[in-house]
Image (cartoon, helix red, strand yellow):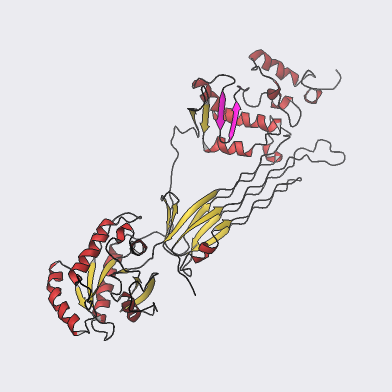
Amino acid sequence: MARFVDRVVIHAAAGNGGNGCASVHREKFKPLGGPDGGNGGSGGNVILVVDSQVHTLLDFHFRPHASATSGKAGAGANRDGANGEDLILRVPDGTVVLTEAGEIVADLVGEGTQLIAAAGGRGGLGNASLASRARKAPGFALLGEPGETRDLVLELKSVADVGLLGFPSAGKSSLIAVLSAAKPKIADYPFTTLVPNLGVITAGETIFTMADVPGLIPGASQGKGLGLDFLRHIERTAVLAHVVDCATYEPGRDPIADIDALEKELSEYTPALGGNFEDRPRVVILNKVDIPDAQDLADIVRPEIEARGLPVFEVSTVSRQGLRELTFKLAEVVREYRAAKPKQESTRIVLRPTAVDDQGFTVIEDPSVEGGFIVKGERPERWIRQTDFSNDEAVGYLADRLNRLGVEEKLVKMGAVPGCQVTIGDLIFDWEPTTPAGIAMTMTGRGSDIRLERNDRIGAHERKALKKARRAPGEYGDDYGDSSEE
């Protein structure tokens, strides 16, 4: 038997980026072919897409783990790795995506609306892409970034024009069954309806939807009964319809008391999507008037309800009394709501410009280590993940990037001294000031960096000596000197 599931937790894992390749072109009679390592492919994304043919979150209830494929590593001869394939997860219209803490990430409404639930990792650059005037033959490549991993809560909030309010067994399921082609379960015991039902109704040229969802009881806004499950599904409705059972024999129950009890629950419930129910138009449906005692009760309470400014309709799902008038009144209210609602653009572009003084990172003092500092920022933390720390030249390249970004300058201004502990992402190291970007990188062998072999900071006179080393063989090796005889 099919099940309706309207709240699930999914574990989305995007694909990892492929590693870049460090390769040198080798061909007969071409000993200096240059770097030709390709880039790694990007990992696949996990994407949520609204599909009108999907009506429940049942698939995610049984398969909550969703993983996209990873990108392939680059190869020599400038061959880039293949990108990972995106994983498309189809969700019902009206799905709200939240974090586990309850913060709304996105409200997915409208066919084809998409959300990247987890972004794939970037592929690492190969040494061909890292070559520059100062670093003509890099002996390293960048690692691929790990894909994003997120735990998200999916909640389905029905997209209906009319929401039916009522106590259990008030006749909501019977009403939607006679007004539409929906076939909800109907019985004579409370809480027959355990899952929302949606019906499509035609009134003249107007077509609208009606939601029949679990009944309310006092205390529903605090979670009693099935109240919270019900209230979540009427957040989007244009009109609220009170379905009142005029034939009930329960002590203490009457139409006025039922309406007041349900209105109290509405006032105490705060919709997750914002707003409230106070501004929603209401109608009152006095049901089961085909029973003589129910008709007498309806005649008694009708004037008091109308005095509150609420339209009243006496109906019977058995004899079909009053259903036509009710249908056209609901269609009229829905038309007015749609006309007053601002038109939704098919595509929305959200611009979040970066502040003019945004450096892309921040440096704060480490509260757990005396004299320590923590560097936070998307770029420096990403560079840490991309660095192969088994390769000295890759570590030197990381130092150059951080220096160009201004991290070292900021650390000096904050009072950092050589040897103090600095944390960037998952990396903790003892900070040593480096040379300006590109000074020493061309004077060492491939895969190594002289700065990691020296503890003292290079002074101005030493940098001048290093520049001369490029033109004459010296202590830094003949690979970077001119070995021709004078």
Judge from the rendering whether residue 237 lies leftward or rightward of residue 475; answer left or right.
left
Expressed as whole percent of the image width and height from the top left, the position of residue 396 reads 66, 29
Judge from the rendering whether residue 332 lies leftward or rightward of residue 88; answer left or right.
left
Q: Say if 262 sits above or below 475 in the image.
A: below
Expressed as whole percent of the image width and height from the top left, the position of residue 391 reads 71, 33
Q: Say if 364 sits above or below 183 in the image.
A: above
Expressed as whole percent of the image width and height from the top left, the position of residue 437 reads 62, 26
Q: Say if 17 sits above or below 420 in the image.
A: below
Residue 432 lies in the magenta-colored region: yes
Question: For this rendering, which residue is in front, 171 or 273?
Answer: 171
Q: What stretch is highlighted in magenta?
A: 420-438
Residue at left offset 35%, top offset 71% = 191
Expressed as whole percent of the image width and height from the top left, the position of residue 270 reads 30, 55
Q: Please state, as top left, top right, bottom left or bottom right, where the C terminus lies in the image.
A: top right
Residue 376 lies in the magenta-colored region: no
Farthest-out residue, top: 461
The mark total stands at 0
Question: For this rendering, which residue is in front, 76 or 433?
Answer: 433
Residue at left offset 15%, top offset 81% = 296
Q: Say if 312 sits above or below 25 in the image.
A: below
